[in-house]
Image: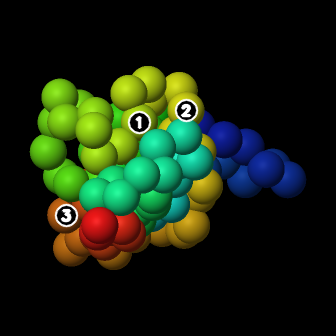
Amino acid sequence: MNKITLAGTTFIIYDHMKPPTDMKKLYLISQDTNMDYDSYDSAVVCATNPTKARHTHPSGGTWENTRTWVKDPAKVTVEYLGKASPRTPIGVVCASFNAG
């Protein structure tokens, strides 16, 4: 519980009134390192922060399959798109795969 006084009026803010810090957001992740056939160039992902978005593989799988994506998460570009619906599951929403 926190107290804030504004213009002589004291307001009490209870913990359950604070916005969640783990609010889900939508991010566009992309890369321009691996542009071969049978590779992903981008995806829209739902994550709680840009770091988690950057570490999401567009296939929904693990980073062991680097043939279809970049080997280094630092080479992934992350762009914030907006807030996600609370019903949107964490993970890949849609992905762009360049089939060969």
Colour theme: rainbow
> The C terminus is located in which quarter?
bottom left
| Near-viewer residue (41 or 94) | 41
| Near-viewer residue (3 or 75) | 75
Residue that sits furthest to the right in the current view: 7
Number of residues whose C-alpha sits closer than 10 Å to that of mark 1, classed few (under 14), some (14–19) or many (20 or more) = many
Residue 85, picture quadrant: bottom left
Secondary element type, mark 2 = helix
Say which residue label 2 marks.
75
> Which of the labelled discs sits on residue 89, or is there none?
3
Residue 46, picture quadrant: bottom left
Closer to the N terminus: mark 2 or mark 1? 1
Horizontal and vertical percent position of residue 91: 24, 55
Secondary element type, mark 1 = loop
Find the distance from the CA under tag 3 to the CA under tag 1. 24 Å
Q: Is residue 10 left or right of residue 59?
A: right
Give the residue displayed 41% in from the left and 36% down from the top: 70
81 w.r.t. 39: above or below: below
Closer to the N terminus: mark 3 or mark 1? 1
> The N terminus is located in which quarter?
top left
Tell which tag, 2 or 3, sits nearer the viewer: 2
Give the residue displayed 35% in from the left and 35% down from the top: 55
Horizontal and vertical percent position of residue 23: 39, 54
Closer to the N terminus: mark 2 or mark 3? 2
Is disc 2 in contact with disc 1, using a CB cutoff of under 8 Å?
yes
Find the distance from the CA under tag 2 to the CA under tag 3. 25 Å
> Which of the labelled discs sits on residue 70, or is there none?
1
Q: Amino acid at mark 1?
A: Val
Give the residue displayed 18% in from the left and 52% down from the top: 60
Secondary element type, mark 3 = loop
Horizontal and vertical percent position of residue 18: 44, 49
